[in-house]
Image (spheres, rainbow, N blue to C red):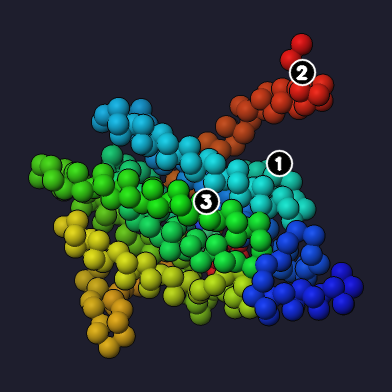
């Protein structure tokens, strides 16, 4: 873009106003957004898998209806985010191809197995709880279409978080065996949930640049702390123990102190070497290939002006 137009970009960012699709923007700003939004969209779509697996074994019709609604919401979030990404001049078909070829990432958290039914509750409570901490500030991100998409996504995420917490509360009022199931599940999901916020600030490649552009509003470590502060009292109310012996209230800072996740594990999972990476991507690729006839039919239908006969 001509220099004058990029001056206008800088002024808009400095005034904390929104950049819209037709505005001039630096190529790196555009590329950063495509990377983050596509990754975010892929996470929503891949994120349907761990819980989707429990749809046919939900213990009651009510639980099944709630879980179905939740998994459908995730699909909606993905589609919504692909649309936001397309305003930056990319095509969602290419983004999907990059996902199934392993050329674009999705959140590390979805590479862990949902091995018990309690995981449906824990994913809602911890994983969607972490997603809310990360995404509420994105309602004020500097790129207009992404910010607006986040408003609806966050409303639905809070329903997801509550349904998870309510499920765990119900199990905690049940038998000793059910309480043990909840604790075992929380033990497995706690550390991976902390990793969702990304590497520590000192090792985060993109944070400084993304903060300066108003794409990110808080650093990875700030959001991780916010999540811990929000979650510890919820764990107490639930009656579960978070698996971190160094968790302690620090009255001097007004925050909880907590231990560090295994950052080597995060690096391995991001690189593709987590417990379920291969399975998740293979499943996504198979669904994409199985759906080819739907895309062809939709294209043929559109080509004849949307007429059936
Ligand atoms: N899982 C997978 N990859 C990650 C994760 C993670 N938890 N955290 C960081 N990374 C990747 C980054 O994408 C980046 O890789 P890249 O350069 O190849 O894209 C690299 O690790 C370095 O990390 P950062 O410099 O900290 O990256 P960034 O500034 O993009 O911050 C973050 C990462 C916090 C995830 C950011 O992209 C973000 O806020 N994204 C939007 C939210 C989102 O995607 N949520 C998805 C999960 S929530 C849900 O769907 C329920």
Q: Does 267 sit left or right of 144 as displayed?
A: left
Crowdedness near tag 3: few (<14), some (14–19) or many (≥20) residues, C-alpha within 10 Å: few
**Residues packed near mark 1 inside 10 Å, few (<14), some (14 to 19) or many (20 plus):** few
Q: Can residue 278 be seen in this view?
A: no
Is the CB of mark 3 within 8 Å of ligand 1? no
Q: Mark 3 points at which residue?
A: 152
Q: Nearer the viewer, mark 1 or mark 3?
A: 3
Q: Is residue 56 above or below residue 20?
A: above
Q: Which comes sooner in the sequence, label 1 or label 3?
A: 1
Q: Which quarter of the figure is the N terminus placed in?
A: bottom right
Residue at (77%, 26%) from the top-left corner?
A: 302
Q: Which residue, given by chain and number where applicable, does mark 2 sit on?
A: 307
Q: Where is residue 8 in the image (x, y as percent from the top left)?
A: 80, 75
Quick check: 250 above or below 270?
below
Determine the quadrant in which ligand 1 lies: bottom right
* Label 1: which secondary element: helix
Residue 113: give its label: none
Give the mark nearest the N terminus, 2 or 3: 3
Q: Who's the residue at 28% across and 41% down the image?
A: 116
Q: In this view, does 130 lie to the left or right of 46?
A: left
What is the number of the mark on residue 93?
A: 1
Q: Which residue is drawn at 68% across and 67% down?
A: 18
Of 270 and 294, which appears nearest the observer? 294
């Amino acid at each position: 873009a001509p220099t004058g137009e990029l001056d206008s970009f800088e002024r808009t960012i400095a005034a904390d106003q929104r950049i819209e699709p037709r505005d001039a923007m630096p190529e790196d700003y555009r590329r950063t957004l495509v990377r983050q939004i596509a990754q975010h969209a892929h996470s929503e779509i891949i994120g349907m898998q761990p819980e989707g697996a429990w749809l046919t074994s939900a213990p009651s019709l009510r639980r099944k209806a709630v879980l179905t609604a939740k998994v459908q919401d995730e699909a909606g979030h993905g589609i919504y985010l692909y649309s936001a990404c397309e305003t930056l001049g990319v095509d969602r078909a290419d983004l999907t191809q990059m996902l199934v070829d392993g050329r674009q990432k999705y959140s590390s958290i979805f590479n862990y197995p949902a091995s018990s039914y309690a995981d449906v509750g824990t994913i809602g409570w911890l994983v969607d709880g972490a997603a809310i901490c990360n995404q509420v500030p994105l309602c004020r991100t500097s790129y207009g279409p992404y910010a607006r998409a986040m408003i609806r996504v966050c409303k639905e995420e809070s329903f997801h978080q509550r349904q998870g917490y309510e499920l765990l509360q119900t199990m905690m009022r049940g038998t000793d065996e059910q309480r043990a199931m909840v604790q075992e599940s929380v033990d497995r999901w706690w550390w991976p949930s902390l990793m969702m916020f990304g590497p520590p600030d000192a090792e985060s490649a993109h944070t400084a640049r993304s903060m300066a552009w108003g794409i990110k509003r808080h650093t990875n470590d700030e959001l991780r702390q916010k999540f811990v502060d929000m979650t510890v009292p919820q764990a107490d109310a639930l009656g579960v123990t978070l698996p971190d012996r160094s968790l302690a209230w620090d009255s001097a800072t007004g925050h909880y102190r907590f231990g560090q996740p295994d950052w080597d594990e995060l690096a391995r999972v991001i690189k593709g070497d987590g417990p379920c990476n291969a399975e998740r991507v293979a499943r996504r690729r198979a669904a994409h290939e199985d759906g080819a006839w739907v895309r062809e039919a939709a294209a043929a239908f559109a080509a004849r002006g949307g007429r059936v006969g």
